[in-house]
Amino acid sequence: MKFLDQAKVYIRSGDGGAGSVSFRREKFIEFGGPDGGDGGRGGDVWAEAVDGLNTLIDYRYQQHFKAKTGIHGMGRNRTGAKGGDVLLRVPAGTQIFEEDNETLICDLTEVGQRFLLAKGGNGGFGNQHFKTSTNQAPRRANPGLPGEERTIWLRLKLIADAGLVGLPNAGKSTFLASVTAAKPKIADYPFTTLHPGLGVARVDAREFVIADIPGLIEGAHEGVGIGDRFLGHVERTRVLLHLVSAQEEHPGKAYETVRGELEAYGHGLDEKHEIVALSQVDTLDADARKKKAAALKRAAGRAPILLSAVSGEGVEETLRALIAVVEEARAEEDPVTTDERWIK
C-alpha cells in the first residue's frame, strides 16, 4: 500500500426536499383542505477516525463526495425521508483544514471521533403550513434549502510516542527494525526511507510506538532533498531520539544541522525532550568512539548513548530512556478524573 499523508477533497451536503402542494379529496368528508407534506432534510457530510487505517490513499482515487438530496414531501401530510449521509473514514491523527490549508477545522486524534463537516439543507414546507383563515386553499410550498459545499484538505500526522530524527543513513530504519516488528527498507544510500514508518517497541513489559521519518539535510526547510514536510509526523510525539552516525566525520556538526532544521520548522519540535545517541558504533574502534562521543557531547551539551542496532549495544538503554519520558508525559497528559465529560 502506498503512503499518502495529504489529500484535497470536495464535499457537498444534500439539498433539502421540496414541500408538496396537495389537497384532501375524500368521499363523504365535507371539508377538504391542504395536506401537502414537508420535504426531507438533505444528507450531512461527516468525518470519522476509524481503526485499521494509517494512510489517506483512498482519497487519491476519489476526491468528490456528495450527500443525497432529501425526498420531496407528498400528499396526505407525508413528510419526505432524510437524504443519505456521506462518511469520510480517516486514520486517527488526521487534521482537516479549510481550502487555504491553514485554517484548522478539526483534529481527529482518537478512533471513534466524528465531526460534522457540512450540514444538509432543511426541507421545504408543504402547503399545509400556509393555511390561514383568509386563505383556506394555499397553492404554494417552499423548495428545500441548498446544501453546503466546500473544499477541504486532509492532512495525516501519525500518532506515536517517540520519533526518530537524524541525517540520512544515521541508522534510524535499522534501529526501528531491530526493536519493532516493522520492516522498513534498509540500504546504504541516502533517502532510502521515503515515507514515515511506525513500529511498536516493547521493553520491561511496557509498549510504546516509534515513528521513523525520512532523513533531514541542511536546507530541508527550504525544500532541499525531500524537504521537511514529514516532520509533521513527529509533532505529536512525546520524545525525540536524535541519531548521529558514528561514520560522520564531524558528529557535532551533523547534530547541529538537524537541530537547525528542527528550529526552522517550528511547531515546538525543537522544544521536545530529546535523547541523543551515537549510532553505528560497532564500526569504530575504542579510540575513535571516545573522540566522536566527546565531539557529540560538546555539541549536544550531554553525553550521548553509544548505540548499535546491529550488535544490540545500547539498545535496551535507549528504549528504557525513551519509555521513561513517554510514561512521565502520559501521566501528565492523562490525569485520573471522574468528570463525566471524559467518559466515552
Image (spheres, grey):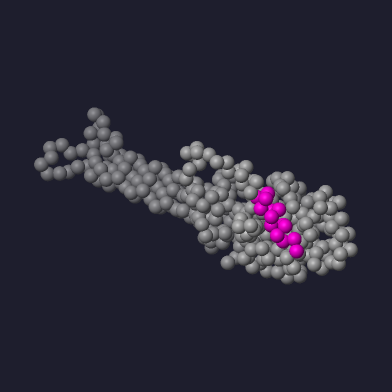
Say above or below: 283 vs 109: below
- Left or right of 189 in this view: 82: left
Q: Quadrant of residue 205?
A: bottom right
In the image, residue 141 lies at what x, y percent?
32, 40
Q: From where the camera sits, is residue 193 visible?
A: no
Whether the magenta-drawn stretch holds residue 66 is answered as no
In front here: 225 or 201? 201
- Magenta segment's dominant SS is helix
Q: Residue at x 84, y 53 (%)?
A: 297
Q: From where the camera sits, is residue 241 visible?
A: yes
Say above or below: 18 vs 191: above
In the image, residue 333 lies at what x, y percent?
61, 43
Q: Which residues are magenta?
A: 313-326
In front here: 178 or 33? 178
In front here: 317 or 168? 317
In the image, residue 303 lies at what x, y percent?
81, 53
In the image, residue 82 lies at what x, y percent?
36, 48
